[in-house]
Image: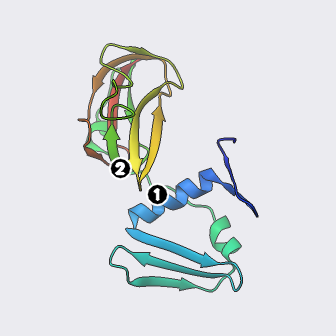
Amino acid sequence: MSKSRLLSKKKSYDLDQLEKILVLMEKHEVAELQWDRGSERLQIKVATQTPVAHFHAPVAEVIEKPLVAQEVPSVESAKALPANQRHVLSPFVGVFYRAPSPEAAPYVKEQQTVQVGEVLCIVEAMKLMNEIESEVSGKILSVLVENGQPVEFGEPLFLVEV
C-alpha cells in the first residue's frame, strides 16, 4: 500500500488530506465527523456531543477546499540558533513518545548521529501514532521533551547539530 493512498472497496482516499482533516478536528475539539454520500449531508460534533454544524453542500466541495495549517510560533523556536543547529518541531498537537512501545529502546539518544528520514519519535494525535522522521542529517544534541508529555504544534522536540 502506498503512503499517500488508503484503498477502500469503492474509493481511494488521500491520506495527506485525511491527516489535515484530523489535525483540524483535533484543533477544534471535533469528536465526530460523519457524512452521507446520498444527499451529501455532513454532520460535525464537538467533544460535548452537540452538533455544531450541518452542511448540505456536496461533500466534494467541502473536502476539496484547501486546508491551511496555521503556524503557531513557540517561544523556543523563536530563539535564534547557531547556524549549525536545527530544531525538530512537532507537526501535530499530541503526545510525545521516544520509543515504539513502553518496553522498547528509544528511537534516538543524545549524541547519536541521525540521517534524513530516520525515525526520531512518535507523536500520537487522535489515537494515530505518527512517526516523526528527521529532515536533516546530524547529531542529536538534546531531547527537549519528556516521554509521554503532551506537545503543541510547532513545539521543538529535538535540537540537532547539522
User: In the picture, residue 85 is in which quadrant?
Assistant: top left
User: In the picture, residue 106 is in which quadrant?
Assistant: top left
Q: How many marks?
A: 2
- 72 or 7, which lies in front? 7
Q: Give the labeled residue for mark 1.
A: 23
- Quick check: marks 2 and 1 in contact, CB under 8 Å? no
Q: Secondary structure at mark 1?
A: helix
How many neighbours does mark 1 have within 10 angstroms: few (below 14), some (14-19), or many (20 or more)?
Answer: many
Q: CA distance from mark 2 to mark 1?
A: 10 Å
Q: Which mark is residue 86?
A: none
x and y percentages locating residue 154 in the rendered image? 38, 44
Q: Which mark is residue 94?
A: 2
Residue beneath the point at 53% across and 22% down = 116
Looking at the image, residue 75 lies above or below residue 115: below
Looking at the image, residue 36 lies above or below residue 148: below
At label 1, which amino acid type do we have?
Answer: Val
In the rendered structure, the answer to whether residue 61 lies left or right of residue 72 reads: right
Looking at the image, residue 119 lies above or below residue 111: below
